Image: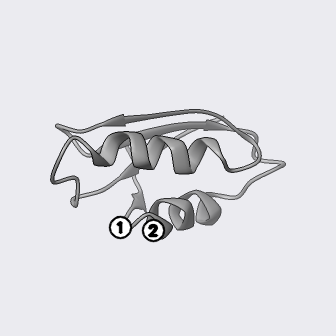
């Protein structure tokens, strides 16, 4: 399954690998891609292993706010 998270706090490109690494370490996440210029965070994951609030929490733990996006 794929979900889009959004963050308005991506203020420098160095946040990209931090967020991608944090999400990749969550059990059930198969891919995480951060688009710095748009604030989009695309996450492919297994919904049986991880819930969306855990994905948001993983981003929060490295210092960035994130929310589930409708598009």
Residue under pointer 2? 60
Q: What is the secondary structure assignment of the residue under circle 2? A: helix
Kindly identify the residue that appears in the image at 51 percent across and 62 percent down: 56
Q: How far from the left and from the top, in percent, is residue 14?
A: 26, 44
Mark count: 2
Kindly identify the residue that appears in the image at 56 percent across and 47 percent down: 23
Separation of residues labelled 2 and 1 (CA atoms): 5 Å
Q: How far from the left and from the top, in percent, is residue 4?
A: 45, 43
Instruction: Establish if 6 lies above or below 44.
Output: below
Instruction: Establish if 9 lies above or below 3.
Output: below
Circles 2 and 1, Cβ within 8 Å, touching? The answer is yes
Q: How far from the left and from the top, in percent, is residue 65?
A: 35, 67
Badge 2: how crowded within 10 Å, few (<14), some, or many (20+)?
some
Which corner quadrant holds the N terminus?
A: top right
Kindly identify the residue that appears in the image at 76 percent across and 40 percent down: 46
- Is 8 positioned to the left or the right of 2 in the image? left
- Is 40 positioned to the left or the right of 51 in the image? left
- Is 40 positioned to the left or the right of 10 in the image? right
- The quarter of the picture where residue 62 lies is bottom left
Which corner quadrant holds the C terminus?
A: top left
Q: What is the secondary structure assignment of the residue under circle 1? A: loop
Residue in front for this viewpoint, 43 or 17: 17
Instruction: Establish if 19 lies above or below 67.
Output: above
Residue in front for this viewpoint, 35 or 16: 16
Badge 1: how crowded within 10 Å, few (<14), some, or many (20+)?
some
Kindly identify the residue that appears in the image at 15 percent across and 54 percent down: 11
Q: How far from the left and from the top, in percent, is residue 55?
A: 58, 57
What colour scheme has been applied to the protein in the rendered image?
one colour
Please tell me the numbered disc located at residue 65. Answer: 1
């Amino acid at each position: 399954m794929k979900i889009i998270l959004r963050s308005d706090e991506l203020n420098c490109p160095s946040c990209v690998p931090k967020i991608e690494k944090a999400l990749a370490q969550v059990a059930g996440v198969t891919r995480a891609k951060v688009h710095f210029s748009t604030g989009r965070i695309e996450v492919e994951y297994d919904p049986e292993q991880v819930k969306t609030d855990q994905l948001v929490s993983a981003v929060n733990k490295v210092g960035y706010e994130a929310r589930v996006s409708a598009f």
